[in-house]
Amino acid sequence: MVQGSVSGAKSEAILSQSAQALIGKHVSALDRGWIELIDAMPHPASGVTADNVVVASARVSFLGESKGAEADRKLIHYLMQHEHHTPFEHIVLTFRLKAPLVTWWQWVRHRTASYNLMSGRYIELPEDEYYIPTEWRLQARRNKQGSEGALDSEAAQRLTERLLEHVERGHQLYKEALAQGVAREQARLFLAGFSVYYTGYVTQNLRNLLHFLRLRTAPDAQHEIRVYARAIYEEFVKPFAPVICEAWEALHAESSD
Ligand SMILES: Cc1cc2nc3c(=O)[nH]c(=O)nc-3n(C[C@H](O)[C@H](O)[C@H](O)COP(=O)(O)OP(=O)(O)OC[C@H]3O[C@@H](n4cnc5c(N)ncnc54)[C@H](O)[C@@H]3O)c2cc1C
């Protein structure tokens, strides 16, 4: 059986209780988006923590288990620093989330996650499910992909109104095409594509999820996906796997020196 040290048993029990509260936790993102943790392995109700799983799977090499909280912590740091990544693959998280297409577009490039998304071929997309930003960022001068600063508030207000008009007009044309019997899969060509919110499931093991989080919490990632990546890390992954995250942060603090 996978278990923590006797000395660490009390803190693990507290951790396990807080981890249990993570299943079903709902966190808002952007104007209409959200993230929920649907399931996790190890399941928090099992009393086994993610940190325990890494220790037990790494020590199976010589059929050992926990050697106490401090030795376990050192082992996790060692594994992370030396890129002995496979023990982290035994931890798996499943999220249900709602994000605009501009965010999904980047998210699904991460091939090591499994995805299922609602389909605009099956359902008619609702008219109030569009991402409307609260500010308009300016094109970065040096980074061709990036943004910096923001449009002044008066110009931003006008632009937001234009986007709302655009979204509304597109949705109206979409409804007109549907009313003429056009298939949902094609009528959606009228929608303000990148703004449309989609709901989906994402399942990923912790090794690959941390890789996703490193790339998508970085300053050069687009703001919209960073909002989701930061929330996943702070609200779910960190409380679920605290020692692993401590080791991960230490590693990336060193590598960004
Ligand atoms: C800031 C930023 C800007 C970007 N800009 C662009 C852009 O302009 N254009 C663009 O097309 N993409 C862009 N991307 C997407 C990027 O190229 C990757 O597709 C995306 O970040 C997924 O990374 P990944 O392949 O490491 O992750 P995953 O697909 O999750 O893969 C994880 C790891 O598994 C291994 N792996 C997975 N599949 C393979 C494979 N087929 N062969 C070998 N190894 C594999 C690799 O080690 C990989 O790092 C950008 C990403 C970021 C973060």
Image (cartoon, helix red, strand yellow):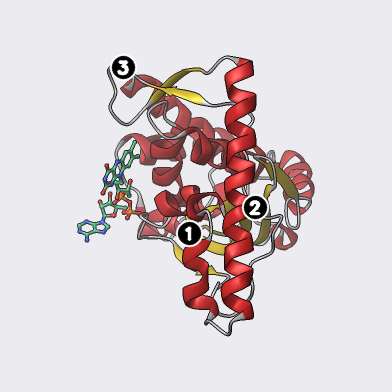
Is residue 75 visible from the viewing direction of this image?
no
The residues tagged by marks 3 and 1 sit, at their Cα atoms, a distance apart of 35 Å
The residue wearing badge 1 is 204
Which sits in the foreground, 129 or 112? 129
The kind of residue tagged 1 is: Gln
The residues tagged by marks 1 and 2 sit, at their Cα atoms, a distance apart of 36 Å
Assess whether mark 2 and mark 3 are in contact (beta carbons under 8 angstroms): no
Is residue 33 visible from the viewing direction of this image?
yes
The residues tagged by marks 3 and 2 sit, at their Cα atoms, a distance apart of 32 Å
Cβ of mark 1 under 8 A from ligand 1: yes
- Kindly state the secondary structure of the residue where label 2 is placed: helix
The residue wearing badge 3 is 141
Which residue is at 58% across, 20% downward? 155
The kind of residue tagged 3 is: Arg
The residue wearing badge 2 is 168
Mark 1 or mark 3, which is nearer the start of the sequence? Answer: 3
